[in-house]
């Protein structure tokens, strides 16, 4: 059941030289743990995994494993341009205390389906930790179609997929098509916070959430309503989230959660350059979005 439920993805606070602030990271992780999220997704896109060196990633994982103490399962992103680097990161994550891995087909030169399959197979061979396929074409520019997913799901340790959620009207059919491509028990989960509740109502078993890494309590409530099939409650809560979803769509969730973390004085770090922090004139919109969640 590792890749089920609400997986909260925190930022990885780090200074301008990419040194992780483990104390601040621990504060964010304790909030997630206390709120009752089903897992922590460390070093995902929200966690700046492509902006950190191997040693700093290892420090972040060790911090998380120590902070969570096994109470909340730890899933770690191990994406890398080179296959040997991804293998090394997977082994680091295993040795540092991760319970599962999240692997994206990161590339500079466009990859073929066969190249992605061999990349995943090599990482799967290097460790016995369960792996979730991270399908994030908006960032990696590679889309994992159902034919490739069928091949990947045949590898025993590849047990889940994190797909981008699609618009609500298309979600049921899209989910059924993915289900048909994999074996029973393969965990199909979704990202894209503003569409995730509909994805769960359509049969998805996991919500991989950016906002839950920063504001876990209201996200837990939304997820539990969706898991319970309570569409009216989902619509009520989701409407309260809409100011955040609007900010995410317009300014990117990555920039927004860094800004909100600073606004709440949970962090004092900006995103890594060349990503620039949000302009000061966006602060009232952030404050209004936070105020709306007090009704959840």
Image (cartoon, rainbow, N blue to C red):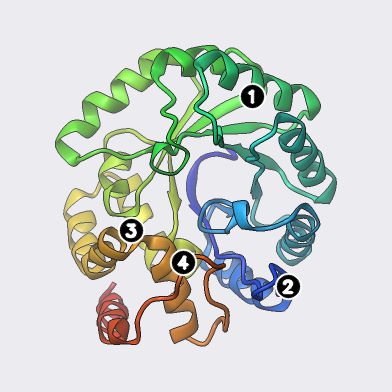
Q: Which of disc 1 and disc 2 is earlier in sequence?
A: 2
Question: Between marks 4 and 2, how big is the CA–CA gap?
Answer: 19 Å
How dense is the environment of label 3, judged by Cα within 10 Å: few (below 14), some, or many (20 and up)?
A: many
The relative height of residue 28 versus residue 167 in the rendered view (above or below) is below
Question: Between marks 2 and 3, how big is the CA–CA gap?
Answer: 29 Å
How dense is the environment of label 4, judged by Cα within 10 Å: few (below 14), some, or many (20 and up)?
A: many
Q: Which of disc 3 and disc 2 is earlier in sequence?
A: 2
| Pointer 2 residue | 22
Residue 127 image position (x, y, % from top left)? 79, 30
Q: Which of disc 4 and disc 3 is earlier in sequence?
A: 4
The residue drawn where x is 33% and y is 58% is: 222
Where disc 1 sits, the SS reads helix
Q: Which of disc 2 and disc 4 is earlier in sequence?
A: 2
Check whether the beta carbons of the residues at disc 2 and disc 3 lie within 8 A of each other: no
The residue drawn where x is 56% and y is 37% is: 106
Question: Between marks 3 and 1, how big is the CA–CA gap?
Answer: 33 Å
Q: Quadrant of the N terminus?
A: top right
Whether residue 223 sits left or right of residue 134 in the image: it is left
| Pointer 1 residue | 120
The relative height of residue 20 versus residue 283 in the rendered view (above or below) is above
Q: Quadrant of the C terminus?
A: bottom left
Question: Between marks 3 and 4, how big is the CA–CA gap?
Answer: 10 Å
Q: Which of disc 1 and disc 3 is earlier in sequence?
A: 1
| Pointer 3 residue | 222
Question: Between marks 2 and 1, how big is the CA–CA gap?
Answer: 30 Å
Question: Between marks 1 and 4, how big is the CA–CA gap?
Answer: 31 Å
| Pointer 4 residue | 216
Q: For residue 116, what is the image quadrant?
A: top right
């Amino acid at each position: 059941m590792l890749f089920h439920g609400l997986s909260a993805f925190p930022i990885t606070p780090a200074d301008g030289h990419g040194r992780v602030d483990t104390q601040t990271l621990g504060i964010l992780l304790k909030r997630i743990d206390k709120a009752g999220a089903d897992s922590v997704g460390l070093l995902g896109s929200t966690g700046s995994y492509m902006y950190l060196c191997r040693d700093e990633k290892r420090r972040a994982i060790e911090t998380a494993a120590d902070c969570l103490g096994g109470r909340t399962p730890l899933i770690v992103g191990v994406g890398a341009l080179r296959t040997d680097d991804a293998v090394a990161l997977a082994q680091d994550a295993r040795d540092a205390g991760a319970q599962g891995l999240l692997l994206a087909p990161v590339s500079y030169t466009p990859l073929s389906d066969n190249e992605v399959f061999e990349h995943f197979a090599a990482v799967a061979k290097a460790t016995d930790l369960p792996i979730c396929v991270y399908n994030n074409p908006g960032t990696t520019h590679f889309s994992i179609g159902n034919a490739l997913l069928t091949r990947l799901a045949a590898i025993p340790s590849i047990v889940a997929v994190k797909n981008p959620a699609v618009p609500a009207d298309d979600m049921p059919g899209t989910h059924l098509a993915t289900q048909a491509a994999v074996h029973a028990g393969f965990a199909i989960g979704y990202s894209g916070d503003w569409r995730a509740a509909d994805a769960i109502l359509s049969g998805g078993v996991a919500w991989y959430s950016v906002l839950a890494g920063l504001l876990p309590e209201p996200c837990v409530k939304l997820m539990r309503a969706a898991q319970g099939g309570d569409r009216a409650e989902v619509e009520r809560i989701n409407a309260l989230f809409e100011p955040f979803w609007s900010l995410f769509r317009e300014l990117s969730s990555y920039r927004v959660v860094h800004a909100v973390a600073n606004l709440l004085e949970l962090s004092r770090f900006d995103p890594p350059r060349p990503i620039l922090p949000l302009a000061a004139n966006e602060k009232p919109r952030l404050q209004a979005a936070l105020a709306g969640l007090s009704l959840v």
